Amino acid sequence: MGSYNTLSHFQRLLSFTKQLTSHVNQGSHDKALTLFHHIQASLALPLDAHVFSLILKSCSSLRRPQLGAAVHAHVTKSSFLPNPYVASALVDMYGKCVSVWTARHLFDEIPHRNVVVWNAMISVYTRNADVAEALRLFEAMDVEPDVGTYNTIMAGMSAMDDGSFRAVEVYRKMCERGWKPDLITLLALLRACVGVAAFRFVKEIHGYDVRNGIDSRSQLSSGLVEAYGRCGCVENAHSVFRGLKEKDVVAWSSLISVYAVHGEARAAFDVFREMEWANVVPDKITFLAVLKACSHAEGLADEALSYFDCMRRYGVRANSDHYSCLVDVLSRAGRLREAYEVIRKMPVKVTARAWGALLSGCRTYGNLELAEIAGRALSELEPDNPSHYLLLSTIYVSLGRHDEAHRMRREMRHKGVKATVGRSWTVQE
């Protein structure tokens, strides 16, 4: 009878675990937590490590640190901490829900750390933009890094202002170690290539994808569209887009963005219309791309206002980036008072980018009144940014107000604000 009950328990646990796995994989984390509580209440025998690793993922996604800590207590009581999947899920949960320090403290206490656990801690650092600490941990690894390790490091570096070349170096090192790139590798590398407009590397990624069939969906292809566009190869971008079997909103938005970057606003508008005809619903990224197209061309303020109204029809709520683009378009067109009214009535937080766009427009059209308003706002938002002081100073000089220009320079010196030397990257193909 006892063996029958034990068998029945494991059959029910197996069934529950399958359901739990399905909920977690589909992102239905509320359902996963409800099921977990039901499992705890209905099964008398202890749970296995896999259940704990799954529920910790849900705790991370829903930002439930208290429940995560309770699961941690169960894990410790059940002696599951040495299990690498449970340990990595705990590190990830603490990194997302509590703090980097707490995650590292737990990581240091884990007795047997395999590459999965190391990758979890490195990811915590890169997610929190501490790439330097991630690299130190990477170099201190006492197990062989895998593709996931390199992918995490590359993704972290690609997000840095000056990390693109270093990300490519990590990729080369990974290949030298005999690891083959996967989709995540190529996406991280592609982001690095976009950062420095490295056409040869973009072609290399494209070729590798074609030869190995890495991207079964359009995720990488959409990235290639944008990457080719950033490198100035609009034809290549268009070719990749047309070759897509299924064109989702990301792919359409990427092509619109390519034309926007190159100032081909009319082509961007045509693509937007094609997208609508294809019954693909534009999202906030699509509208940001089309507004940038208006911004990078001249005399398209009315079109920008029209697309802004179109957002409302599609139920897309404008954010700070959309409003900043609209202010930029109006300011470039000399419609400074309208731009200022947009800023005044913004239902979202006004960013330095919006005020900076207005200030630039004031320099072009010599509007000192609005320039001083924008300048004051910028000095509060970004007191250490020298460009705003210099721009307002330039406006004073252009209007013959040299005393005010000198005052701006003195204010910069008083605040210790120094003009930075410009720099640029070049890639030798």
Image: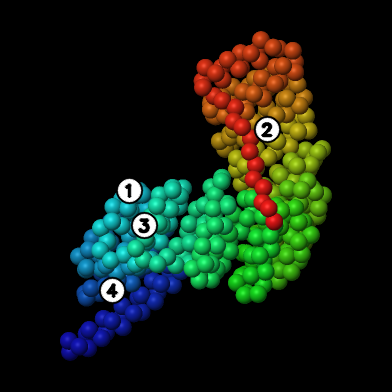
Q: CA distance from mark 2 to mark 1?
A: 39 Å
Q: CA distance from mark 2 to mark 3?
A: 46 Å
Contact, mark 1 vs mark 4 (Cβ under 8 Å):
no
Residue type of the residue flagged with mark 2: Ala
Of label 4 and label 2, which has the lower sequence position?
4
The residue singled out by tag 3 in the image is 140
Q: CA distance from mark 3 to mark 4?
A: 32 Å
* Residue 181 image-quadrant placement: bottom right
Q: Is residue 204 left or right of residue 239?
A: left
Instruction: Give the class, few, some or many, for how many residues have Cα within 10 Å of label 4's Cα (few <14, many ≥20).
Output: some
Instruction: Give the class, few, some or many, for how many residues have Cα within 10 Å of label 2's Cα (few <14, many ≥20).
Output: many
Q: Nearer the viewer, mark 1 or mark 4?
A: 1
Q: Position of residue 72 (x, y in %)?
A: 27, 60
Asked if one can make out residue 62 in the rendered structure from this viewpoint, the answer is no
Q: CA distance from mark 1 to mark 4?
A: 28 Å
Q: Position of residue 326 (x, y in %)?
A: 70, 38
Quadrant containing the C terminus is: bottom right
Residue 13, above or below 183: below
Q: Residue at x 31, y 83 (%)?
A: 11
Dot 1: what SS? helix
The residue singled out by tag 4 in the image is 48
Contact, mark 2 vs mark 1 (Cβ under 8 Å):
no
Q: Position of residue 298 (x, y in %)?
A: 81, 38
The residue singled out by tag 1 in the image is 101
Dot 4: what SS? loop
Dot 2: what SS? helix
The one nearer the camera, 30 or 186, is 186
Residue 344, above or below 270: above
